[in-house]
Amino acid sequence: MADGKSSPIRSACFIVPTYNEAENIVAIIRQILGLERAYLSVQVLVVDDSSPDGTANLVLELEDERVCVLSGKKQGLGSAYIRGFAHVLEHMSVDAIVQMDADFSHAPTDASRLLAQLENSDVAIGSRYVAGGSVDPAWGLRRRLISKFGNMFARYVAGIYRVRDCTAGFKAIRVEALRRAFPLRLRVQGYVFQVASLHALHISGASIAEVPIYFADRAAGETKLGRDDVIEFFVHVWWLRLLSRKTFIKFALTGLSGVVVNLASFQLLLSTVTNPYLSSAIAIEASIIWNFFLNNFWTFRDRAISSRKRVRGLKFNAVSLLTLALSFSTFVLLRWLFPEHPAWLSQLISIFPAALANYFANSYWTFKSDQV
Ligand SMILES: Nc1nc2c(ncn2[C@@H]2O[C@H](COP(=O)(O)OP(=O)(O)O)[C@@H](O)[C@H]2O)c(=O)[nH]1
Ligand SMILES: [Mg+2]
């Protein structure tokens, strides 16, 4: 968890996307509901894309109040998950969600281990590629290579280096972490959703852990992974790369503009207020406020507002106070040491140690992440 707090998971909604899973859906729902315990309530949300084989009807025939179906037209796995997430965030009150396939590749009993892991992290990935994890021996060399390559490509191009299984479809996520990462401006249709949503959780500061699982070959039916999914995958992962860079460039530009605001207001104040110390303090404060608003409404505007964000706001303010104190004392020290130098030079130099402290305090405390 981003701030080290951990509240127990007492309720979970399993989101199961389906397209033509009539042979599996009832059995998988029964096994999921079998995970219910006195301390854990379980619900199932099936997101079906109007499967021609009548998957949705089979779910409705169960007539179980813990199970519901979201029906839509066929748009792909990613669109289905985005609909499912939105439904949970808007209409349900649960502590966690579990993403799971309907075809028994993901064993429902493993979900308990993923949920248990949420006591210590925001996201738990059912991972095939950490020690103890594996895939069905029936997988041929070609399938193994494709999976490994796709995964490596996602890890290194999208920049989620520490996660071994970036394309995993079996995950438990704390709802508060999901809320912080969404509403994402995710424009994905297909399987790349797994990488895109992980990337969004990662950049929103969620802590991510991997739990080893055995990934079985599907029990019945056939894979829905299509050519469009593969093309979208390779294009979108590059887009994710650009997105991270875009945020970084915006962050740097914000910092630079803060320097300009600082110096411009300092010069302006110096000519009106004349007291260089008062001018320095006000100019530093003006640039802190400027940076805060630009970062909020421009650099990180894609990030959702949550109560955790308010805690971050407080931390951000505390860090800003430290920045103000450091910058101002540097200014005072420089004026004392070098009174013959122009005041604006002292003001400019005073920005640097403060900016450094600000960067470290913000990245290791305010926006601390367990990831890369
Ligand atoms: N709603 C929905 N579910 C899908 C779609 N494509 C795949 N799924 C479901 O996503 C899960 C994983 O799909 P699968 O074909 O098993 O992928 P594979 O394991 O990578 O071969 C299964 O439960 C599928 O029924 C889709 O377009 N819409
Ligand atoms: Mg499958």
Image (spheres, rainbow, N blue to C red):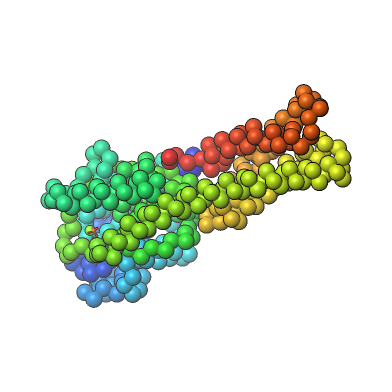
Q: Is residue 309 visible?
A: no
Left-right relation of 89 to 250: left
Q: Where's residue 277, x and y in %?
A: 81, 35
Q: Quadrant of ligand 2?
A: bottom left
Of residues 263 and 287, the one nearer the viewer is 263
- Residue 77 image position (x, y, % from top left): 32, 64
Q: Is residue 177 left or right of residue 344?
A: left
Q: Nearer the viewer, residue 79 or 173?
A: 79
* Extreme residue toward the top, this view: 337
For image coordinates 38% across by 63% down, the residue present is: 188
Find the residue positioned furthest to the front.
341
Q: Residue at x 48, y 64 (%)?
A: 90
- In the rendered image, the vertical position of residue 55 relative to residue 333, given as above or below: below
Q: Is residue 278 left or right of residue 135?
A: right
Q: Where is 327 relative to 166, above or below? A: above
| Quarter occupied by residue 68 | bottom left
Residue 186 image offset from top left, x and y in percent: 43, 61
The quarter of the rendered structure image containing the C terminus is top left
- Who's the residue at 48% across and 49% down the image? 245
Q: Quadrant of residue 210?
A: top left
Image height of 211 relative to 85, above or below: above
